[in-house]
């Protein structure tokens, strides 16, 4: 069945276009195009968001939160001086997604709605306490990313809704972040394990530490590390964090690693990412 | 022209009960739908003819062609093909290689000995596809028993794909007088013509194979593949048809590499001199043997194992089994990367036992000029030692980051230079000359070599030589691109043509057909040194550099020559570290290039090449083969480097981080 | 859907199904330099530019090209023949199957206006697979085109 193709010029129009059953939103099209080509989805309508002014904006708001429009491409995010100054870990992750062609047109919104458990950005956005804004016929609703991503390729987005923006609150003063992606095979493959570590080291010791883990569970995991609060971020503390990461994950065995190996790598790369934060 | 989409078996083995094409036939734009019942049992093959054009009665692997839809467009054909219902009574299948040759394993073929070109007999295990035995096994046992040190190890190999970027493609048309025309990504047009003639039971002169450029071959595009089907469809629909495989079809149902294992037992005396070795290879040939071209239906590289060394006694047995999986074919130096991996690894393990380092055990045992190799072959000269020393002299250790372990590994390979029959025609052109050649350009630089060679022979500038590939109707013969034979064969043809052309006043067309036979018996050595940095905590192996020392005679085009080495090493690296055509329950699971990953720009190590010049070459230009050198010793060199770095020996390809991690954590010592 | 965009600098109009992919449209126009390799956006044989963005045309929905500039290797070779020269001089090809995509990526990289160095060049080309060359000659060709 041949789908209709629409290119709404406004969010309102887009929401209207998405009201039809079987309508699918298209950002850069790298995922939707692939699924359509393979016959895995048969949408009745493709709603391209590329013409909507303002949906690609990257800015900060009054309280210092970083706001990224859902149609911002991964390349734009990776090249943004604003993102680099406020959230360099996001730049690092965005610059390593897929390949240069994916990044050139792939959008943040498309990336998050696709919800592949191995993706690079979700673990980073989880530790940064990111929030998504959804827009539907009934208006907008905001949701923490950790509630938005439900399972493999499954999010809380409802039919007729669009993801329009990601908000990342400002970090406390001395926050260190590090994203490491472990690709033991081909470098621009999905990582076997991705670890986004965050340590708030204000006052000379750990106020908060957390890791986001990709590739080791049916969805990206946010692992808060309250055990580290009030301590120095030293080798002993980091070892505890590694253990917590290993315990938290629920990996599946596949071509990129057995469950046991992924668990061991979750520990190893958590340790390495936090060690980088502690330097 | 109409387009073809293929309906394929979804089970590894079964009896076809019914094929329901009704919905497809009723689809607008569909010209016809054909099954094995329509076409009949037609078999093709490069040597043994056991491959059905379309399955009749039985399917033998997931991906086998069961029906073909012809339609006005490819998308209509594919949509209609998705509606065809194939009812199959699934039967027990043979998927396990080790069990395939046992009496209880389900028969892949009822009477495999009965196929034309079969090399097995009724007395053989019923799933045996081929068996090759060379050497003196009794003598080997005697010497091994008396050896001071013996290694007995098994090395295992996943399947892989040639990874050409252009998938299998074919266009066929049939004239009203029955003459068949084929345009196909196939690197040996004359052999293809003969294979089609045999399959379709028609005279080869009534089949014309037309010139095409080919987007990479690497051994995977030498069979009739979809051409017999396209010809049958062109006949039945009365129009030209085109079949282009989607890449997932190519990965899952074309002719990927054999998986398997090689057991090597090798001994040496107290001084590290080799006494004897026995190699026992068992490989998975998949459902059909027809994709292998040599008379033994085996992989040449397996029978040549250990060829670079002086060994008093050697024995090899190479068996290939039928299984209900995708039929396997050739890939660049077929069998050699596996044989070299096994032998060179065993040699390193033996060196350890004998208290020698990898360079030294090779120094003591590499074949010298005048000596016969383990298989009784002698060469006009044997430059393994010079090549090894050149590699070692050029070697410079690289620094590695703190926490990583540096390792170095060495491996040796030698490959004889063969020629074979070829022809060409030289004509005066508008400005210079035109040379018509029978073989396609697959990316190896064949046409460049012809141009350069002719330019030299005629004393003119290369840009005045125009090279044109012509159809099989226009020239007598060529054996096809493969076996690294092209440069040597062509150089003979070029020399003769240039001489005849000049004698004739340079204004008359000249056709030559050559079959060089007095080639000096020549082999070319390639020694590679791999440097790796291993992260012991994750097992990750970063290959930093592959240094290739290559034994060369005349090099016609230095940059094309260098690219064959570097591209070969990239392929060797992929085999060593990345590539695994994963199969589950008889189905190829790695069904796209996102899953079956070949090396990218950021994966490959640094290439360094050192040419060891001054060898005697073959033919008028005095050349040595290079196309199937650089990809062969790489995996062995990398495994040796990993062992050097970590103390553990990886015996299973590809060498993944997880495997190294597991080896380190189970404390297996090299 | 009715589509209108610039194809290699010239106005192009067509009717196409809503789910049409840009690769099929391009090849349907006889521009066969752009090739289907893997069909899943990984190998890069199908690379074209849409405005300045390199895309995998095999999975690029043609509707997203509406009103924009599409450049295939044919157009890029005409507008930037020195790119082709660089590849010839540095032997950045063997069989040619990946070459169209490599040339298009080279044009995209050059258009960014800054030289990312050898590592940055390799990173940019990491999604363009080649089975023949081992990549060094391709990287050399692109770096020569960048003027380094």
Image (spheres, helix red, strand yellow):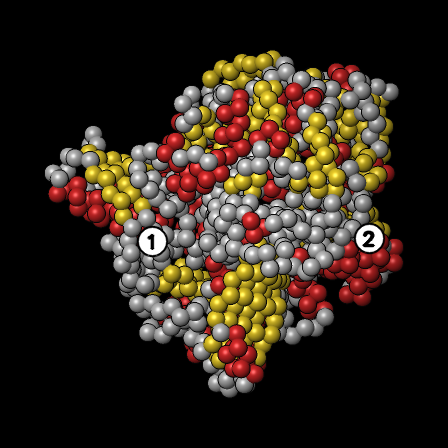
Q: Nearer the viewer, residue B178 or B356?
A: B178
Residue B51 visible (yes or no): yes
Residue C84 position by quadrant = top left
Horizontal relation, residue B459 to residue B566: left or right: left
Which chain is mark 2 on?
Answer: A
User: What's the residue at 29%, 62% (across, down)?
Assistant: B520
Q: Secondary structure at mark 1?
A: loop
The residue beneath circle 2 is: A249
Q: Tell me the crowding category of disc 2: few under 14, some 14 to 19, or many 20 or more residues within 10 angstroms, Cα based.
A: many
Q: Secondary structure at mark 2?
A: loop
Tag 1 and tag 2 share a subunit: no
Please determine whether, in this image, residue C35 is positioned above or below residue B259. Answer: above
Q: Nearer the viewer, residue A226 or B463?
A: B463
Please determine whether, in this image, residue A241 is positioned above or below residue B460. Answer: below
Please determine whether, in this image, residue B437 is positioned above or below residue A274. Answer: above
Q: Nearer the viewer, residue B67 or B83?
A: B67
User: If the image is split into quadrants, where does the C terminus of chain B sit?
Assistant: bottom right
Disc 1 and disc 2: Cα gap in Å?
A: 59 Å
Q: Nearer the viewer, residue B329 or A246?
A: B329
What percent of the width, then of the height, locates residue A69? 72, 30
Labelled pair 1, 2 in contact (Cβ < 8 Å): no
What percent of the width, then of the height, locates residue B459? 17, 45
What percent of the width, then of the height, locates residue C107? 47, 34
User: What's the residue at 63%, 34% (across, down)?
Assistant: B66
Horizontal relation, residue B90 to residue B638: left or right: right
The residue beneath circle 1 is: B419
């Amino acid at each position: 069945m041949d789908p209709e193709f629409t290119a709404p010029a406004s969010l309102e129009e887009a929401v209207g276009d998405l009201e039809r059953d079987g309508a699918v939103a298209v950002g850069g099209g790298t995922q939707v195009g692939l699924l359509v080509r393979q016959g895995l989805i048969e949408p009745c309508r493709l709603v391209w968001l590329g013409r909507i002014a303002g949906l690609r904006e990257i800015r900060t708001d009054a309280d210092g939160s970083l706001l990224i429009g859902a149609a911002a491409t991964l390349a734009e995010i990776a090249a943004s001086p604003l993102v680099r100054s406020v959230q360099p870990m996001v730049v690092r992750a965005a610059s390593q997604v897929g390949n240069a062609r994916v990044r050139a047109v792939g959008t943040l919104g498309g990336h998050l709605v696709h919800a592949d458990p191995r993706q690079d950005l979700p673990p980073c956005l989880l530790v940064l306490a990111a929030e998504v804004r959804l827009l539907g016929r009934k208006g907008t609703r905001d949701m923490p990313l950790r509630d938005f991503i439900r399972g493999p390729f499954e999010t809380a987005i409802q039919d007729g809704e669009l993801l329009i923006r990601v908000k990342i609150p400002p970090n406390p003063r001395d926050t260190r972040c590090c994203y490491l992606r472990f690709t033991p095979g081909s470098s621009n493959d999905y990582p076997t394990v991705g670890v986004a570590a965050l340590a708030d080291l204000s006052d000379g010791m750990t106020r908060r530490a957390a890791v986001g883990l990709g590739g080791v569970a049916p969805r990206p995991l946010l692992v808060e590390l309250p055990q580290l609060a009030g301590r120095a971020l030293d080798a002993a503390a980091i070892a505890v964090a590694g253990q917590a990461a290993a315990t938290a994950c629920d990996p599946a065995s596949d071509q990129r690693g057995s469950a046991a190996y992924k668990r061991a790598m979750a520990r190893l790369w958590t340790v390495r990412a936090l060690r980088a934060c502690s330097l | 022209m109409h387009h073809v989409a293929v309906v394929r078996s979804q089970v590894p083995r079964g009896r076809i009960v019914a094929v329901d094409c009704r919905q497809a036939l009723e689809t607008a734009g569909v010209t016809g739908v054909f099954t094995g019942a329509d076409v009949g049992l037609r078999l093709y093959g490069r040597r043994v003819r056991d491959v059905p054009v379309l399955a009749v009665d039985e399917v033998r692997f997931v991906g086998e062609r069961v029906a073909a839809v012809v339609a006005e467009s490819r998308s209509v054909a594919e949509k209609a093909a998705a509606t065809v219902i194939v009812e199959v009574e699934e039967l027990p299948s043979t998927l396990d290689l080790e069990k395939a040759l046992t009496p209880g394993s389900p028969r892949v073929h009822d009477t495999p000995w009965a196929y034309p070109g079969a090399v097995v007999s009724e007395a053989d295990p019923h799933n045996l596809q081929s068996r090759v035995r060379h050497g003196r096994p009794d003598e080997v046992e005697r010497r091994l028993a008396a050896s001071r040190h013996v290694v007995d190890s098994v090395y295992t190999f996943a399947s892989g794909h040639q990874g050409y970027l252009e998938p299998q493609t074919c266009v066929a048309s049939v004239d009203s007088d029955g003459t068949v025309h084929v345009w196909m990504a196939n690197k040996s047009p004359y052999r293809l013509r003969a294979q089609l003639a045999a399959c379709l039971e028609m005279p080869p002169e009534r089949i014309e194979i037309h010139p095409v450029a080919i987007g990479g071959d690497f051994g995977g595009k030498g069979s009739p593949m979809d051409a017999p089907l396209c010809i049958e469809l062109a006949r039945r629909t009365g129009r030209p048809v085109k079949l282009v495989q989607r890449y997932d079809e190519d990965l899952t149902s074309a002719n990927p590499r054999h998986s398997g294992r090689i057991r090597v037992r090798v001994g040496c005396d107290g001084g590290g001199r080799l006494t004897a070795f026995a190699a026992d290879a068992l490989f998975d040939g998949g459902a059909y043997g027809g994709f292998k071209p040599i008379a033994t239906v085996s992989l040449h590289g397996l029978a040549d194992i250990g060829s670079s060394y002086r060994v008093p006694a050697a024995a090899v047995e190479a068996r290939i089994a039928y299984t209900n999986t995708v039929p396997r074919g050739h890939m660049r130096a077929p069998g050699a990367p596996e044989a070299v991996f096994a032998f060179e690894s065993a040699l390193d393990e033996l060196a350890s036992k004998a208290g020698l380092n990898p360079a030294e055990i090779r120094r003591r045992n590499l074949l010298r000029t005048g000596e016969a190799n383990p298989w009784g072959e002698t060469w006009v000269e044997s430059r393994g030692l010079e090549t090894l020393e050149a590699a070692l002299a050029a070697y410079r250790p690289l620094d590695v980051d703190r926490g990583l372990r540096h390792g170095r590994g060495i491996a040796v390979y030698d490959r004889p230079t063969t020629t074979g029959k070829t022809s060409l025609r030289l004509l005066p052109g508008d400005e210079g000359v035109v040379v018509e050649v029978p073989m396609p350009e697959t990316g190896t630089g064949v046409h460049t070599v012809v141009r350069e060679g002719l330019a030299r022979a005629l004393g003119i500038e290369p840009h005045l030589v125009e090279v044109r590939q012509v159809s099989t109707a226009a020239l007598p013969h060529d054996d096809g691109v493969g076996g690294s034979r092209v440069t040597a064969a062509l150089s003979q043809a070029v020399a003769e043509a240039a001489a005849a052309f000049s004698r004739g006043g340079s204004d008359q067309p000249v056709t030559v057909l050559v079959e060089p036979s007095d080639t000096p018996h020549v082999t070319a050595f390639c020694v590679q040194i791999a440097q790796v940095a291993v992260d012991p905590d994750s097992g990750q192996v970063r290959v930093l550099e592959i240094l290739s020392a290559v034994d060369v005679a005349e090099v016609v085009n230095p940059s094309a020559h260098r690219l064959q080495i570097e591209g070969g090493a990239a392929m060797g690296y992929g085999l060593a570290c990345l590539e695994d055509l994963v199969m589950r329950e008889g189905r190829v699971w790695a069904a796209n290039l996102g899953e079956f990953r070949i090396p990218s720009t950021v994966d490959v190590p640094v290439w360094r090449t050192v040419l060891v010049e001054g060898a005697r070459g073959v033919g008028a230009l005095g050349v040595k083969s290079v196309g199937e050198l650089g990809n062969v010793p790489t995996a062995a060199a990398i495994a040796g480097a990993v062992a050097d770095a970590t103390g553990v020996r990886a015996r299973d390809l590809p060498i993944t981080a997880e495997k190294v991690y597991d080896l380190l954590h189970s404390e297996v010592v090299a | 859907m009715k589509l209108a965009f610039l194809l290699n600098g010239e106005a192009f109009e067509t009717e196409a199904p809503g789910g049409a992919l840009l690769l099929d449209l391009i090849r349907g126009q006889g521009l066969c330099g752009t090739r289907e390799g893997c069909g899943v956006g990984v190998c890069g044989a199908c690379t074209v530019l849409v405005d300045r963005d390199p895309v995998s045309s095999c999975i690029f929905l043609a509707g997203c090209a509406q009103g924009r500039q599409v450049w295939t290797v044919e157009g890029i070779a005409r507008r930037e023949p020195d790119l082709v020269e660089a590849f010839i001089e540095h032997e950045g090809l063997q069989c040619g199957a990946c070459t169209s995509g490599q040339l298009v990526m080279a044009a995209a990289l050059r258009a960014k206006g800054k030289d990312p160095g050898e590592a940055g060049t390799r990173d940019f080309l990491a999604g363009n697979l080649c089975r023949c060359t081992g990549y060094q000659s391709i990287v050399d060709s692109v770096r020569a085109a960048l003027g380094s």
